[in-house]
Image (cartoon, rainbow, N blue to C red):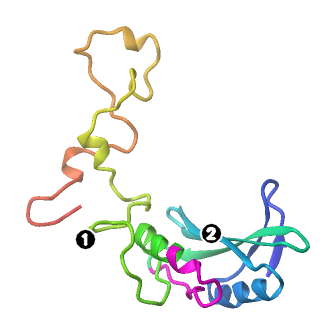
Amino acid sequence: MSLEDNGFGPRHRVVEAAEWHDAVAQLKRDGYTYFDWLSAVDEHPEGFRLVLHVARVRPLDHLLLVTYLDRDAPAVASIADVYGGAAWHERETHEMFGIDFGVALEPLLLPDGFEGHPLRKEFVLASRVAKPWPGAKEPGESDAESTHSPSRRRIKPPGVPEPEEWGPQAGGRDA
């Protein structure tokens, strides 16, 4: 486990996914008894960065533990046996990113029957289609363009898919 300085924020250690559980358990034995949070970052198209933030009181220190997971089958061992509070974070990360923690996880935030993982970059933001952009100007418009008549062609806000790319699809395929 190498200790790295990322130039800002807390120091971090990067471990292989297979070493995740053992590295977390070692941190707790080293006095990092305060579990703060666990989440992921979609590093599309490479995969996911799983990040854990822990701290210790004496001597006062905190750090991030990082591992990288494959995009096609993101999986890592659960750490809920090391830090009980991690179970909630694992449930949320599983729902939002689709990362498998090797244990059965109850749904937490999404409604029953929801399909997909909303924090993955390939997830289509259908709400951007259903609700108009609330600003006076559309993203990408300059002040000069905003004086045009209301009949001008509107620019699509970022994240808005083409109409055929979202919602229920013809032929029974869901987006």
Question: Which residue has dot 1 on it?
Answer: 112
Which region is colored magenta? Answer: 73-88
Q: Is residue 81 magenta?
A: yes
- Who is closer to the viewer here, 41 or 112? 112
Question: Which residue has dot 2 on it?
Answer: 37
Instruction: Specify the quadrant of the image occupied by residue 68.
Output: bottom right
160 relative to 55 in the view: left or right: left
134 relative to 18 in the view: left or right: left
Could you tell me the amino acid type at mark 1?
Asp
56 relative to 105 in the view: left or right: right
Q: Is residue 49 magenta?
A: no
The residue at 44%/60% (across/down) is: 119
148 relative to 41 in the view: left or right: left
Instruction: Specify the quadrant of the image occupied by residue 33.
Output: bottom right
Instruction: Specify the quadrant of the image occupied by residue 111.
Output: bottom left
Q: Is residue 117 placed above or below 7 in the rendered structure? A: below
> Measured from the top left, where is residue 148 in percent x and y?
32, 9
> Measured from the top left, where is residue 149 in percent x and y?
27, 9
Q: Is residue 69 placed above or below 104 in the rendered structure? A: above
Q: The N terminus appears in which quarter of the rendering? A: bottom right
The residue at 44%/10% (across/down) is: 144
Dot 1, crowdedness within 10 Å: few (<14), some or many (≥20)? few
Q: Secondary structure at mark 1?
A: loop
Dominant SS type (magenta): loop
Q: Is residue 9 placed above or below 29 in the rendered structure? A: above
> Measured from the top left, where is residue 17 in percent x and y?
62, 83
The residue at 49%/79% (across/down) is: 74
Which numbered dot is residue 49?
none
Q: The C terminus appears in which quarter of the rendering? A: bottom left
- Who is closer to the viewer here, 79 or 121? 79
Q: Secondary structure at mark 2?
A: strand
Could you tell me the amino acid type at mark 2?
Trp
